[in-house]
Image: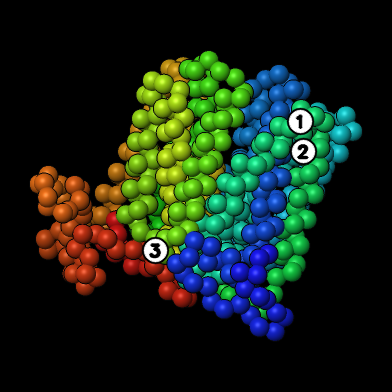
Amino acid sequence: MSSAAGQDTATEPDRPADKTGTFSALRIRNYRLFATGAVVSNTGTWMSRIAQDWLVLSITGSSFAVGITTALQFLPMLLFGLYGGVIADRYPKRQILLCTQAALGLLGLLLAGLTLGGVVQVWHVYTIAFLLGMVTVVDNPTRQTFVVEMVGPAVMRNAVSLNAANFQAARLVGPAVAGVLITAVGSGWAFLINGLSFIAPLTGLLLMRTAELHTIERAPRAKGQLREGLRYVAGKPELIWPIVLVGFIGTFGFNFPIWLSAFANKVFDSGAGTYGLLNTLMAAGSLLGALLAARRSRTRLRMLVAAAAVFGLLEGAASLAPAFWLFAALLVPIGIFGLTFNTTANATVQLATEPVMRGRVMSLYMMVFVGGTPVGGPVMGWVTDTYGARVGFLSGGLISAAAAVAVGLVLARAAGLRPRLDLRRGSGRALVSFVPREGGAGASGAASEGDPAGDGEAAGSAGGSAPRLTPAA
């Protein structure tokens, strides 16, 4: 760790982080430990994903078998995701993460032992993939909500963005290292490194100063907590509609392994090297989007909807690109806006949620986002196989853009706003903006906020209480 991040002592806690810096959350010692461990384990995870797919393909010779492996890893989130949120709300999150990270590491070592021992069979990979998914059911919402305990609500947006940048940076390195290892010594060594990589986050969690964690109210053990979480989300438009939008984008808009492999192989008649290049460009755009998001100090519902709409339109434009380099160039802004949407949605939902409910709400968020893969993947794969890569990519983009427009209109109506189209040149106004409806509830709200153009924001208080649904839609 560099000295610029602040000199930590055992007796003097970190000062509150500046809200506006790109790396402001890294000034907090506990978060630095968390992020350092995460970048190591994320790199190992990306290595394992590539090696796992290659291992299944080498054993079976079937791309369908690779798809089954992916579906089994995401299926538990779809089936049991909400229960993970109940556990995250009920028990200390640091202790939960110590258990889940250790379990993920042991499963990685188990797969490494089977592969290096020469006894691995495809059912072993299927079983371990499903068990990894079961652990992730608890690990994912716990990691998402533990961020606010480390940094507090004021810096949470920045920490969420840096988490995304961390993951995307590992995405740039992990697959490349895995490719070298698989070629040189086989998949088993990639699994071994992945299993050992979890020592880093476990060490970071153990070294944290628990006295510097922000106190978050935990839900007591009681019946009906799952239903309570669903009712809580259903009663808040500022939660339910962003989560609905996340579900549509996650299910239909993020099927890049299907589309990029189809474009590389069938449209541009290229091989694995081109497929790797396309993934690298997407990851580079996502990393840039995460760093740009880290600079923002406010989370706007309007930005959430706009990022989703631009993301879908860019996918549509890329699907029609006549030349390879135009298609490849468009993947960078697609990565930027896709990551902007992800980080904005994550921060918006967390800040709009009371601390005692945050685990259950984020488990629902992750369930609709990640759990949509077993549904959207086969559907988009069938469309791509039947009608071609261009139609498949175009359909995913159009669905994403249409969902963004629909959710934007619903949020605007809930805030008492109506869309306004301004075609006058030199008016200084946006082409499309939202203004209060005459006699509507949004008129007084917008006036009191000084925000007639619908430029409000979702901002949680220091206690993490739910924000108002302002004219940010």
Q: Is 272 rendered above or below residue 334?
A: above
| Rendered-image quadrant of the C terminus | bottom left
Label 3 is placed on what type of residue?
A: Arg
Q: Are marks 2 and 1 in contact (CB under 8 Å)?
A: yes
Label 1: element kind: helix
Identify the residue at image location x=81%, y=37%. 189
Q: Which disc is residue 390 wearing?
A: none
- Residue sitting at the far bottom: 11
Q: Nearer the viewer, residue 280 or 87?
A: 280
Label 2 is placed on what type of residue?
A: Ala
Q: Is residue 236 visible?
A: no
Q: Is residue 351 visible?
A: yes
Q: Nearer the viewer, residue 337 or 464?
A: 337
Q: Which residue is mark 1?
A: 182
Pointer 3 or 2: first along the chain = 2
Identify the residue at image location x=81%, y=42%. 192
Q: Nearer the viewer, residue 174 or 45?
A: 174
Identify the residue at image location x=53%, y=76%. 16
Q: Position of residue 27 (x, y in %)?
A: 58, 69
Pointer 2 or 1: first along the chain = 1
Image coloring type:
rainbow
Q: Give how far apart the Cα atoms at labels 1 and 3 are.
A: 43 Å
Q: Which residue is mark 2?
A: 190
Residue 220's quadrant in the figure? bottom right
Dot 2 surroundings within 10 Å: few (below 14), some, or many (20 or more)? many
Please indicate whether residue 37 sits to the left or right of residue 456 in the image. right
- Residue sitting at the far right: 117
